[in-house]
Amino acid sequence: MALETVKKAIPLSTNHAIANAVKDLDVDVISAYPITPQTTVVEKISEFIAKGELDAEYIHVESEHSALSAAISASLTGARAFTATASQGFALMHEMLHIASGLRAPLVMSVAMRSLSAPISIWNDQSDLFNARDSGWIILFAHTAQEAYDTIIQAYKIAEDQNVLLPVMVGYDGYVMSHTIEPVITESREKVIKFAPKKQYPYKLDPDKPVSIGAITPPEYYYEFKYQQVNAVNNSLPTIEKVDEEFGKTFGRSYGLMECYMCEDAEALIMTNASYASTLKAFLPDIRKEGIKVGLLRVRLYRPFPLQKFIEYTSDKKTVLVIDRAISYGAPFQGPLANEISGAIVREGLKLNLISVVAGIGQRTVEYEDFLALARLAYEGKKHKETIFYGVRE
Amino acid sequence: MEKLVSFKDMAPGGIVVNPGNSLEYKTGDWKVLIPVINQETCTRCRICWYVCPDNAILELDKEYTTKKNRKYKVSYDVSSDFCKGCGMCAQECPVKAIEMVPVEVA
């Protein structure tokens, strides 16, 4: 960041950056249930409401299942709704995840990604979010507190677009991001609302124009509704791209659908997301000094998957090493993202060597030496049939 | 058979934009037995109308005079569209005026 930019910034954790975004978006309904490491998001929002900085309905619910239920219902009445979660709470929401996307509720949820019990662990990995990858939501990852703030704003503009009408979740790493303070530029509500004006759900509950929501759907119709969702998720991609571009024009910051960092002269890419991407950005100059020509392929938009961007960025590369921080037990590759990349390689007939690495499970820290070792592995470009469980004690 | 609409012509999210259309959804096409109400012995107590879980007992503004010259202002009938043939009306009828008969006979 340039000095003038830094001067405008305020110190915020990613959780507080998200709370600020919710305030600046003038969200109408927040349903809240605390869970580590998300808690300070809803805690901060409650402070904003108490101080009169945000005029919103704040619903204290008795579980995350209810948190998402309330947010869905609010959204379907035409309100701008928000909730946040992580880990066990996210898992408890699972039923409602599908209902949110099935009902096409344009709400936004932030996820401070965390490992899943058992054995219980409060620390970071991405098991919670990757468990929900097939729930029909638009899924974005942020890799800095600033990007989290900006992405929450973008998320409402995407979700409420009348051609999209899908819930959006924004994932970021628990603790490593949620509780780490970074400089963040926040914008005025006026500017934010001008960028993302409230657009109501077109079939909202309205006594003057009654509709039925959530009716049972027989075999003659159910499949067609699901196919509508297939198209809605796929067709949202150009909107997501356009919203990011417009955001760039308005606020001077944009991120693209997928980011390739130190990419041009790289022979191999390490594909990762969230905090691993920001960490690797810091490490790459030193890794390059070792003569290891690798770059970073950062996953920002995960659903819908920006396949064309992936093809574009990997077209002249020999190897892509995918780091997964979640485990798909018993799958051909046990990293869920690696599994999908292998599908993309087959679909497109790419000549790309894929190395699947699982790391950082339960926040087993990946240090500089570890990234260096992984970069070396990618640069060597050998074939590895099995997923590498990096850092596990033999 | 009615022509089903394309996914392109359906409102998103399974939303029913024309509420009340469950009236068009005939739920009684799988019954085996259907009640037949004897207007002669029926005392118009309305118990069948109350107990029917599908609102399939119809109270009609149709006068009826029994052979013993008793006059009633209403008659009872059964909606074949919604009766599932459960027989609760026949079971509860205090004067046994309702008989369950095979659909093909009725």
Image (cartoon, coloured by chain):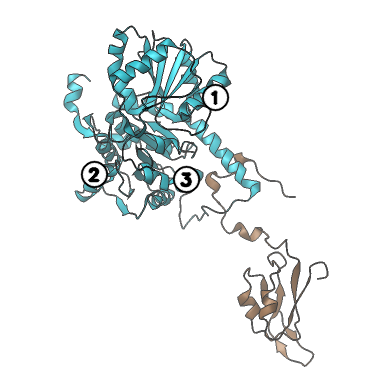
Chain colours: A cyan, B brown
Among the two numbered marks 1 and 2 on one chain, the one whose residue lies closer to the N terminus: 2
**Disc 1, disc 2: CB below 8 Å?**
no
* Residue hosting label 1: A343
2 vs 3, front mark = 2
* Residue hosting label 2: A44
In the picture, which quadrant includes the C terminus of chain A?
Answer: top left
Amino acid carrying mark 3 in the image: Pro
Q: Is residue A23 above or below residue A212?
A: above
* Residue hosting label 3: A202
Using the rendered view, name the quadrant where residue A283 is placed: top left
Chain label for disc 2: A
**Disc 1, disc 3: CB below 8 Å?**
no
Amino acid carrying mark 2 in the image: Lys
How far apart are the alpha carbons under marks 2 and 3?
31 Å
Q: Are the numbered discs 1 and 2 placed on the same chain, yes or no?
A: yes
**Of A138 and A357, the residue lying toward us:** A357
Q: Is residue B59 above or below residue A330?
A: below
